Amino acid sequence: MRPAWWQHYLTLKHHWSVAIYRNAAANIEGYLIYERQATNFAIQEWVTSTPTAFERLANFITKHGTTFETFSYDSPSATNGLDLLADPYRLKVTVQPYMMARIVDLYDFIKRYPFLTDIQPIRLAVSDATLPANQGIWSLTRHNGQVTLNRVSDQLTGPADIQLTIQQLTTACFGTQSLARAYQHGLITGDVNAINRLDTSLVKERPALIDYF
């Protein structure tokens, strides 16, 4: 979605190389963006759509073992496939916060959200100390793929099925932590059946926030 000039900017700013794997039909099944540093082979992106592409690009990387002292890979996802390598025990893996997601416009976000199932009416008491437009009791319904969201009150004192903060709703919608687990640890309150119903409709796959500044 970047404009054309941004693609040229990236190539001018970074000294990156690209390795591409094509199958027998010459279709691309994977690519590797990397940088040759003084003593380190720095992998920026490693994306594959087939096991064969992963293995071939892994072999491409290991062939540089006599040229570089270390190899690094900053992956946006914990499910990066590094456990599939022949000797994963030699890897040193650390988790480091990089980007943070936050629902800014609750109404617009929920209307666009790709719910997995229809939802019988649920009332959410959402607290947001930063953006008053998000705070209040919201009635959420999804019927035949059509999402309806109405704020029935800008207060939090009325009847609601689930009480949670905008941060807890964000982590649930982005697959970081389920509503059921948040309830078990006392992070949210409400009716267990309503929590489970909403939980079932949420996407469980975590998104990857990838961008270059």
Image (cartoon, rainbow, N blue to C red):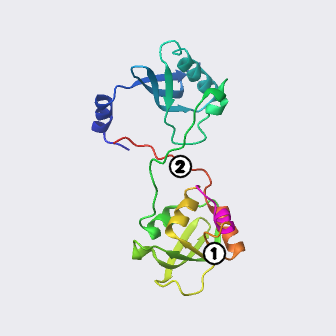
Q: CA distance from mark 2 to mark 1?
A: 26 Å
- Is residue 23 in view? no
Residue 24 sits in quarter: top right
- Where residue 168 sits: x, y (%)? 55, 65
Residue located 55% across and 60% down the image? 171
Amino acid type, residue under disc 2 in the picture: Pro
- Is residue 17 in view? yes
Indicate which disc residue 189 carries.
1
- Where residue 53 sits: x, y (%)? 59, 25
Left or right? Give the position of 3 relative to 183.
Answer: left
At label 2, counting other C-alpha atoms closer than 10 Å, the crowd grade (few under 14, some 14-19, many 20 or more) is few
Q: Nearer the viewer, residue 13 or 94?
A: 94
- Where residue 73 sits: x, y (%)? 50, 32
The single residue placed furthest to the right in the displayed view is 193
SS at badge 1: strand
> Is most of the magenta stretch helix, strand or loop?
helix
SS at badge 2: loop
Q: Which residues are magenta?
A: 176-184
Amino acid type, residue under disc 1 in the picture: Thr
Left or right? Give the position of 120 relative to 73.
Answer: right
Left or right? Give the position of 4 relative to 122.
Answer: left
Q: Which residue is mark 2?
A: 207
Residue 191 sits in quarter: bottom right
Of the 4 image quadrants, the one containing the C terminus is: top left
